[in-house]
Amino acid sequence: MKYICIDIETTGLDPVNNQIIEFCALINPGNYFHCYVYHERYVCNAYAAALNVEIFKKLSKRDSDYKYYSPCQMMFEFKNWLNIQNLLETKINFAGRNIGSFDIQFLNKIPGWNEIRHAHRYLDIGNLYVQPSDDIIPDLQECLNRADFTMNIKHTAYDDALAVWNLMKYKGF
């Protein structure tokens, strides 16, 4: 099965009021689309601001080491990337952690997202690492622990997408 691991970082947990500030879509470690997403004004809660302080520093500097797009530009560039991968006309399977209940809710707000053909079911890595004794689905770090990976997660969209990719490969996907 072909899939793309995606992850976002946001200014909070509310997809109605908060915004995407980082986006990554990863086919494999050498083939990915990554950017920071800027807005005229940020709607942010204190926890998200503290958690994403490094992203906000990058957004304030906008140095040439990274790509910075408005939400509409991000979608345009992402669709171009999908086209280069010969995936624009293909129904895409997306993988991630909390992808259906979180990431997709934010991405649905961006003009053009609905033009991307994707399956309405998502591969959530937490479900692949559930154990019978669990009370809740494990988070990304717990999935890494259970797979005995020693990745240092820096809470960036790229690192999280890469962690999902590694965990999917470990499970044979």
Image (spheres, grey):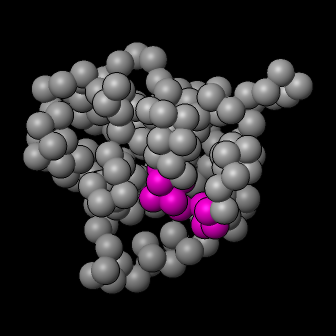
For residue 148, say whether it is visible. Answer: yes
Q: Where is residue 61 in the image (x, y as percent from the top left)?
A: 40, 83
Q: Establish if 34 lies above or below 27.
A: below
User: Residue at coordinates 39% horizontally, 52% vertically from top-left?
Assistant: 24
For this rendering, which residue is in front, 103 or 1? 1
For this rendering, which residue is in front, 64 or 122? 122
Q: Position of residue 171 (x, y in %)?
A: 55, 35
User: Residue at coordinates 73% horizontally, 44% vertically from top-left?
Assistant: 146
The image quarter in which residue 116 lies: top left
Q: Where is residue 141 in the image (x, y as percent from the top left)?
A: 70, 51
Q: Where is residue 31 in the image (x, y as percent from the top left)?
A: 27, 55
The image quarter in which residue 67 lies: bottom left
Q: Establish if 137 lies above or below 55.
A: above
User: Horizontally, is 33 left or right of 147 in the view?
Assistant: left
What residue range appears in magenta?
Answer: 151-162
Q: Where's the N terminus, which quadrant?
A: top left
User: Residue at coordinates 52% horizontally, 71% vertically from top-left?
Assistant: 56
User: Residue at coordinates 64% horizontally, 66% vertically from top-left?
Assistant: 152
